Amino acid sequence: MNHWSKQNDVLGTTNRGNAIESGLCTLCRADCKGKCETWLASLKGRETLYPRDFGLVTAGSGNTCHVGVSYNALRIQGACYGARGMNGNEDKARSGDCLFTDVNLATSFGNQVKTNCRLPFMTGALGSTFIAAKYWNSFAVGCALAGVPIVVGENVVGVDRASELSSGRIQSAPELERRIQTYLRYHDGMGAIIVQLNVEDTRNGVAEYLAEKYGDRIIIELKWGQGAKNIGGEIEVTSLDYALFLKKRGYLVDPDPENPGVREAFASGAVRSFARHSRLGYTAQDSYEKVRDEFMTSVKYLRSLGFARITLKTGSYGMEGLAMAIRFASEAGLDLLTMDGSGGGTGMSPWNMMETWGVPSVLLHAKAYEYAALLAARGQRVVDMSFAGGFAKESNIFKALALGAPFVKMICMGRAMMIPGFLGTNIEGALHPERREAINGNWDALPATVVEHGRTPEEIFAAWHQLSSRLGKDEMRNVPYGAVAIVTLMDKLSAGLQQLLAGARKFDVADIRREDITSANRETERETGIPFITEVGDETARRILLG
């Protein structure tokens, strides 16, 4: 049982279901009518940073009980003087005219080729789940406009009935093409589109197809795992015909749609769905040395195809798997390593597996820093990192960047980046019934939770006019409302992160350091290596008093 509150009276937010540390509900619905903090921020942007009903209220922090080890048990350390990272604006600092909006959030990652990003955020892998396909236009356009990377997840080609394979190799991949082209239409050089490869994708020749068609416009990502599960990816299908198609594509389909007893059970209604599963990676290997050899061979091959940028995504396999990922990715000269802790989200994973397997995010990330520091102390280059696993608020984004500094360049978010896509799409479908079916809108009319903010997109979305000024009114007609909602949420997260950095007197996100956070209990201090809150600066304080 967690201790996260379902309601925040200060912000006027409510969780529909059980609240978790990120502030999201355990089960996030695409048709939700609100209103958790992320949902509301997708409409109101940075206004959501502040208590509601200004002028009528005062507000006091509940100062949530810091029990156990979690990101909630880390505190952000402020500073009362100084200004690091002004980068050419030192005169402004000397004149005392610094504002939180002076904080630079632009970042980059990479080895030989740098990928520049407007914000230190990226999406989790949005793969073969139907919800990713349904709302891709919103996700891709929103991320491109925000200048952040988006990841096309595993199995997109394999589950696409319109894709064509010959001798096991892709000849055409309409869904994959749609996803890439949608992002590239609004890509302005900031951010990137990353395409993930799992075992099936590798066998189907996804890398070769992408290399020939897109070259270095695409970042390719090797997939080891994710925080939600320790087996390959899966989706659920309710069509016997589709289940048979997937089995012919080489997937495990459970139960077996070719089994006569299963087919009878499906016909009678006793079996209503089938789960498609991917193969497990590296099952032919029995030692980490052999895994390393196979991994290095894969990287070398991808480079021979022309990919200048290669990344790795791994899950919470434990300390050995974590060390392997960091060491191998660093030695191979990869551009980014995303480490997904348990507690992250899913499109579809076995629920009890999600609840009980793997290393919780804050513990995994603390050890990632420790292991990276070991390599750095030996003079070795350490791969740039991205932390994932249950992030949705700017406060925890700050803490994760600090916990992994200076190695962590990005924070990867899954469900938090999807919520505005759902919400904006539902609003567009309600306001434009003629589009509803095509865009997968879920509402017939605007609910009261939206109407209280307006009845037109210009009234509802805080970022609408900003985007309209940037793109022009004609082009704005082509932008999905879900993309507008994503940009609106990014505005809230970026403003909140700027405020926290300014409070730490760090005016560039690259200057964030571990000393910018403290542990609120001794257990968290022991597990993360972050000093206890009253011991940070204690020696300096005594010199001030007694010097």
Image (cartoon, rainbow, N blue to C red):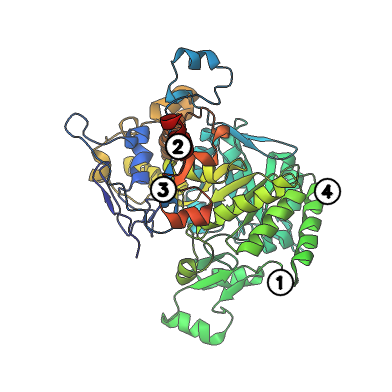
Viewer-nearest residue: 47 or 73:
73
Instruction: Please give left or right for residue 329 compared with residue 120 in the image.
Output: right
Camera-near label (4 vs 1) is: 1
User: Which residue corresponds to mark 3?
Assistant: 419
| Point 46% across, 83% down: residue | 265
User: Which residue corresponds to mark 2?
Assistant: 490
Question: Looking at the picture, how far across and down is residue 307, in whole percent?
Answer: 76, 44
- Tag 1–tag 2 contact (CB < 8 Å): no
Viewer-nearest residue: 202 or 157:
202
User: Which residue corresponds to mark 4?
Assistant: 304
How many residues crowd around disc 3 within 10 Å: few (fewer than 14), some, or many (20 or more)?
A: many
Can the viewer see residue 155?
yes
User: Which residue corresponds to mark 1?
Assistant: 283
Distance of label 1 from label 2 (alpha carbons): 40 Å
Quarter assignment of residue 477? top left
Q: Earlier in the sequence, mark 4 or mark 2?
A: 4
Camera-near label (1 vs 3) is: 1
Q: Is 544 rendered above or below residue 219?
A: above
Question: Looking at the picture, how far across and down is residue 359, in whole percent?
Answer: 53, 62
Instruction: Please give left or right for residue 82 compared with residue 224 in the image.
Output: left
| Point 52% across, 68% down: residue | 357
Distance of label 4 from label 2 (alpha carbons): 37 Å
Question: Looking at the picture, how far across and down is residue 367, in whole percent?
Answer: 59, 55
Give, as a three-letter code, the residue at label 1: Thr
Distance of label 1 from label 3 (alpha carbons): 36 Å
